Image (cartoon, helix red, strand yellow):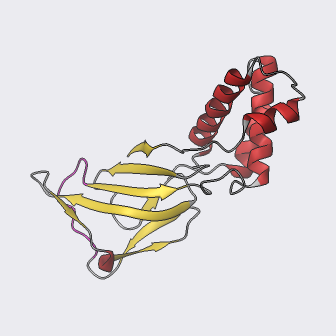
Amino acid sequence: MNIDVTTAPTIEPLTTTTVKAALRIQHSLDDDRITNLITAVRTDAEERGHIAINTQTITLDLNSDEASSPVWLPRPPFQSLSSFVVYDEDGVSSSVSSAYYYINGNDPAHIVSQDDGWTLSRANKAATVVYIAGYGGSVASVPMGIRESLTQMVGELYEEGEVKDKTWSDFLKTWGHDVY
């Protein structure tokens, strides 16, 4: 399984202003650094927690074992499916019609075949799924608990140069997902 964020979030789950207020920073000397720390913490949290925080497009390349029904879609929460493509032995692609599957759940979601489903005739890169995931396209759409955890992580990184193991552990227990 190869997971690639093909369209990154257009906004971050925190603003520099809210982080500065939480950390009681009253100058603008470190604004660029704080902005970069917000991005770094979000991407690290998504990788470690196997989640998508803000809306993003994910491309998932699957081998034949992984592309059998049901196909689990990592990095919840799921928003919508953009495309589901299978490849024949020669690498020629064909789209799977939505008449042959349905989406079950959103946290995590999985694609379940209906009737005959789809045929896989290739071992490596048997299918590609492109989908939209994340809590939404605004700061307010991200659950408050995630925003508070990320703010704490940015603060620890800003003040101490690293995020404490306990902070990561608490975040992952509450918001993390297993790899499927």
Q: Return the x and y of residue 110 as percentages of the image width and height.
A: 46, 65
User: Where 146 falls versus 100 (above or below)?
Assistant: above
Depth check: 157 or 1 in front? 157
What residue do we see at 45% from left, 72% from top?
103
Q: Return the x and y of residue 77 as percentages of the image width and height.
A: 58, 59
In the visual, does 28 lie left or right of 42?
right
User: Where 145 falls versus 67 (above or below)?
Assistant: above
In the visual, does 12 lie left or right of 111?
right
* Residue 65 visible within the image: no
The magenta stretch is: 117-126
What residue do we see at 53% from left, 51% from top?
75
In the visual, does 112 lie left or right of 49?
left
User: Which of the 4 image quadrants contains residue 23?
Assistant: top right
User: Which of the 4 image quadrants contains residue 154?
Assistant: top right
Our reading of the magenta stretch's main secondary structure is loop
- Residue 96 belongs to magenta span: no
Q: Return the x and y of residue 135 as percentages of the image width and height.
A: 62, 57
